[in-house]
Image (cartoon, rainbow, N blue to C red):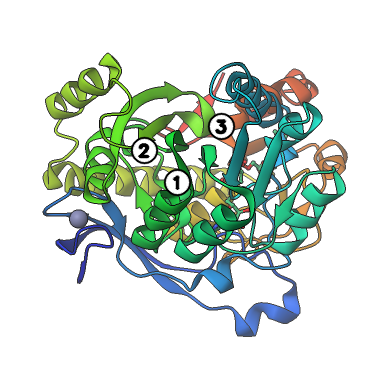
């Protein structure tokens, strides 16, 4: 299976294949099972610009709509991270007269609420109407639409140039990357910056975080590929820094060529990526073997525990849980339910694997013996909240970077 690269038209050959998968955030009721749709989840690396990307994609209107399940404000960790981001922008890029910031994919307004409270001119672009409405209700200015070239021109015409264009866990979702960059080109002030924070291929590989691969994540960026993407569309990568979100991401800063002096971190991270062969297609193929090992180990552990009559459940129903349960073939026979604090997911089934999602109270009521931590990126917050579980002899099963029972 091969496609043309969405960035540069080079060739992308499938290297890692996680099988047929449903929409990762397509939590559904039992009556919707018959209509559920599956797409092959495989990624490959462009032979020219090295961008790792999905081979097949689901239309954006099927992924983002008026009942999009992901609520960005759902964890304390995320709220404080995005508040810090906002404060940093306020103190730096937005410190001049009448600054203007646009966020692509603002979701429920987790970042923009701090900006709005500071009285700074802003606009969120968010196609999923339910979360866009949640942001509106917080007093944030939002347009319910997809960001693309036309949106960039429209905003420029009504609001003028943006000092900052920001995106978090959104730019990798946008398959029309050429149109996106033309929109940024239309909208960004001459001295403005386009900043985005996205899952990092280096982390996916280091931590065996193959569950970051799902239909919404079209791209798996590296510093090398983002530098190539920026240059391809007439921009320059001027900064890159590791951040702790979602187990380890990178925040990229892009500017118009020659406007900003590139930070030393760019060259340093490029050197580090080269040393570990991150742009080598072999690296992805080797990763396949590691992922298969996790599947085998997790399945054999769950089967053994079931044979021993232990109650094993899942904790957290992030999009990641869809990838893991479907790739491994884990259904309600091995995990009778998963706990999730998101009211919109409770009472529904995990896409594809059809494991019921239940509220945290069920965890306390049923007192399971083991819990598979699907929301592993929130381990600290969850383990602290559910301290009683281990105190009562319960054990956490973690499959990142390999399957183990946490002590
Ligand atoms: N920024 C938040 C939300 C990330 S989820 C966070 O980091 O937690 C990704 C969001 O991007 C979703 O709310 C989705 O509706 C939105 N999105 C998807 N495609 C988009 C596009 N083309 N333009 C703007 N937003 C988009
Ligand atoms: P998240 O890690 O944000 O990611 P994604 O969907 O992008 O993979 O999702 C975390 C999920 O875990 C979310 O559905 C909320 C849930 N959760 C809990 O149930 N309890 C908690 O204490 C926390 C922090 C999260
Ligand atoms: Zn390419």
Is residue 396 visible from the viewing direction of this image?
Answer: no
Instruction: Name the one closer to the observer, 188 or 113.
Output: 188
What residue does disc 3 label? 377
- Classify 10 Å Cα crowding around label 3: few (below 14), some (14-19), many (20 and above): some
Q: Which mark is residue 320?
A: none
**What element does badge 3 sit on?**
helix
Q: Position of residue 189 (x, y in %)?
A: 47, 39
**What element does badge 2 sit on?**
helix
Are the residues at dot 2 and dot 1 in contact (C-beta closer than 8 Å)? yes
Q: CA distance from mark 2 to mark 1?
A: 7 Å
**What element does badge 1 sit on?**
helix
Instruction: Name the one closer to the observer, 107 or 122.
Output: 122
Q: Position of residue 370 (x, y in %)?
A: 65, 36
What residue does disc 2 label? 204
Q: CA distance from mark 3 to mark 1?
A: 11 Å
- Classify 10 Å Cα crowding around label 2: few (below 14), some (14-19), many (20 and above): many
Q: Which mark is residue 212?
A: 1
Q: Is mark 3 within 8 Å of ligand 2?
A: yes
Identify the mark nearer the N-term, 3 or 1.
1
């Amino acid at each position: 299976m091969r496609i043309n690269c969405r960035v540069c038209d080079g060739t992308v050959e499938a290297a890692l294949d996680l099988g047929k998968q449903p929409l990762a955030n397509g939590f559904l009721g039992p009556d919707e099972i018959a209509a559920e749709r599956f797409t092959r989840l495989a990624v490959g690396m462009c032979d020219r610009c090295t961008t790792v990307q999905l081979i097949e994609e689901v239309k954006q209107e099927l992924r983002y709509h008026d009942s999009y399940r992901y609520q960005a404000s759902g964890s304390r960790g995320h709220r404080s991270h995005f508040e810090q981001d906002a404060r940093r922008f306020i103190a730096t890029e937005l410190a001049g007269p009448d600054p203007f910031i646009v966020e692509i994919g603002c979701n429920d307004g987790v970042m923009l609420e701090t900006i709005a409270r500071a009285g700074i001119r802003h606009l969120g672009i968010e196609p999923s109407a339910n979360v866009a409405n949640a942001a509106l209700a917080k007093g944030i200015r939002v347009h319910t639409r997809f960001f693309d070239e036309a949106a960039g021109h429209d905003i420029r015409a009504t609001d003028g140039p943006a000092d900052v264009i920001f995106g978090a866990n959104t730019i990798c979702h946008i398959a029309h990357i050429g149109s996106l960059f033309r929109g940024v080109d239309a909208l960004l002030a001459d001295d403005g910056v386009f900043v985005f924070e996205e899952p990092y291929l280096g982390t996916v590989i280091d931590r065996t975080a193959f569950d970051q691969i799902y239909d919404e994540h079209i791209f798996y960026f590296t510093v090398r590929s983002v530098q190539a993407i920026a240059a391809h569309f007439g921009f320059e990568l001027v900064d890159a820094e590791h951040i702790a979100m979602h187990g380890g991401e990178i925040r990229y800063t892009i500017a118009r060529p020659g406007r900003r002096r590139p930070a030393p971190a760019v060259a340093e991270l490029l050197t580090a990526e080269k040393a570990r062969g991150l742009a080598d297609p072999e690296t992805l193929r080797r990763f396949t073997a590691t992922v298969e090992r996790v599947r085998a180990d997790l399945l054999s552990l769950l089967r053994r525990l079931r044979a021993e009559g232990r109650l094993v459940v899942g904790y957290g129903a992030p999009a990641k849980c869809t990838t893991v349960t479907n790739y491994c073939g884990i259904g309600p026979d091995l995990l009778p339910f998963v706990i999730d604090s998101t009211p919109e997911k409770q009472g529904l089934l995990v896409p594809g694997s059809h494991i019921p999602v239940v509220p945290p109270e069920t965890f306390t009521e049923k007192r399971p013996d083991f819990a598979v931590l699907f929301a592993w990126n929130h381990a600290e917050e969850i383990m602290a909240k559910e301290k009683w579980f281990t105190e009562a002899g319960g054990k956490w099963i973690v499959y990142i970077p390999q399957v183990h029972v946490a002590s």
